[in-house]
């Protein structure tokens, strides 16, 4: 379901590779993602990771039928509290890969074409930068299928597009196109088609990767710290960080 290809020592592309199912996220995906992200995070030369989908779309989101079938098989002998405990820890494990992207040391660029639905939006919300081709379609679709999103969009999108736009997407479950995604600042850049998107993503990754690895890691660390702290606390944190690391 997931494949890693290297552009050079500093840049890798993490591909969602189930094109015959629009890269729908099956049970195997959730098992593989933390392993693949850990592999990337442990690569000491790597600086930037592009996330893309093979085939016609980034991802159609959770493969509900296939996923639920696997869950039902695994819980068939369970009852009551045991089943609820399994589900709770399953959700936490599903969150793990996206959390690793959000909290990791690499710079992650989501490059979206075609559908980016549900779990796809959770995934790109965990990335540092989001870009898309003109055919992209974004949706926080969980509302329409009777689920409260539990994989990151409700938690991360307010810091990206604001509280109001997040509530609009979450309560309606509506689709938005690339122009609308650009307007609300869900994405940073748009490209005409998938081919230009990939070229643009690589060009952006090369620009980022020309900077020193420890500085990129420091910038991401401080930006993430600022999400949970006041500006005053953030300024003190970066002062402590730089005074510890800078050579004078």
Image (cartoon, rainbow, N blue to C red):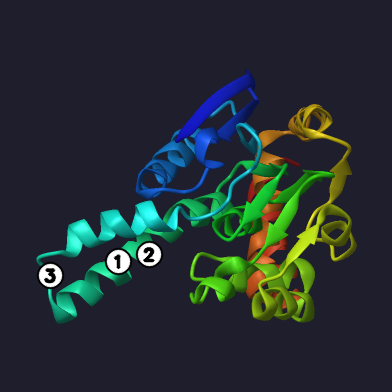
Which mark, residue 89?
1
- Residue 190, above or below 209: below
**What residue does disc 2 label?**
92
Q: CA distance from mark 3 to mark 1?
A: 14 Å
SS category of the residue bearing label 2: helix
Q: Which class describes the residues within 10 Å of circle 1: few (<14), some (14-19), or many (20+)? A: few
Marks 2 and 1: CB-CB under 8 Å? Answer: yes
The x and y percentages for residue 206 are: 78, 28
Q: Residue at x 58, y 61 (%)?
A: 118
Q: Residue at x 82, y 59 (%)?
A: 181
Q: Residue 173 lies in what quarter of the image?
A: bottom right
- Residue 197, above or below 58: above
Does residue 127 appear anywhere in the picture? no
**What residue does disc 3 label?**
78
Which mark, residue 70?
none
Lower position in the chain sequence, tag 3 or tag 2: 3
Position of 179 compared to 104: left or right? right
Q: Residue at x 89, y 56 (%)?
A: 179
């Amino acid at each position: 379901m997931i494949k890693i290809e290297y552009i050079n020592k500093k840049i890798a592309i993490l591909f969602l590779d189930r094109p015959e199912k629009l890269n729908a996220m099956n049970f195997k995906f959730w098992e593989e993602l933390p392993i693949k992200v850990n592999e990337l995070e442990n690569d000491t030369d790597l600086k930037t990771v592009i996330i893309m989908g093979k085939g016609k779309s980034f991802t159609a989101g959770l493969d509900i039928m296939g996923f639920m079938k696997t869950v039902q098989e695994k819980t068939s002998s369970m009852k009551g509290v045991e089943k609820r405990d399994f589900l709770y820890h399953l959700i936490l494990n599903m969150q793990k890969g996206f959390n690793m992207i959000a909290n990791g040391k690499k710079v992650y660029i989501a490059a979206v074409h075609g559908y980016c639905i549900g779990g796809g939006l959770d995934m790109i919300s965990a990335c540092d930068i989001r870009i898309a081709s003109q055919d992209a379609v974004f949706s926080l679709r969980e509302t329409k299928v009777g689920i409260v999103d539990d994989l990151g969009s409700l938690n991360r999108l307010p810091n990206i597009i604001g509280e109001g736009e997040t509530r609009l997407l979450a309560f309606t479950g509506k689709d938005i196109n690339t122009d609308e995604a650009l307007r609300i600042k869900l994405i940073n850049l748009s490209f005409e088609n998938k081919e230009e998107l990939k070229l643009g993503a690589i060009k952006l990754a090369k620009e980022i990767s020309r900077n020193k690895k420890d500085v990129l890691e420091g910038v991401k660390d401080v930006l993430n710290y600022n999400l949970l702290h006041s500006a005053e606390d953030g300024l003190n944190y970066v002062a402590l960080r730089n005074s510890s690391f800078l050579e004078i």
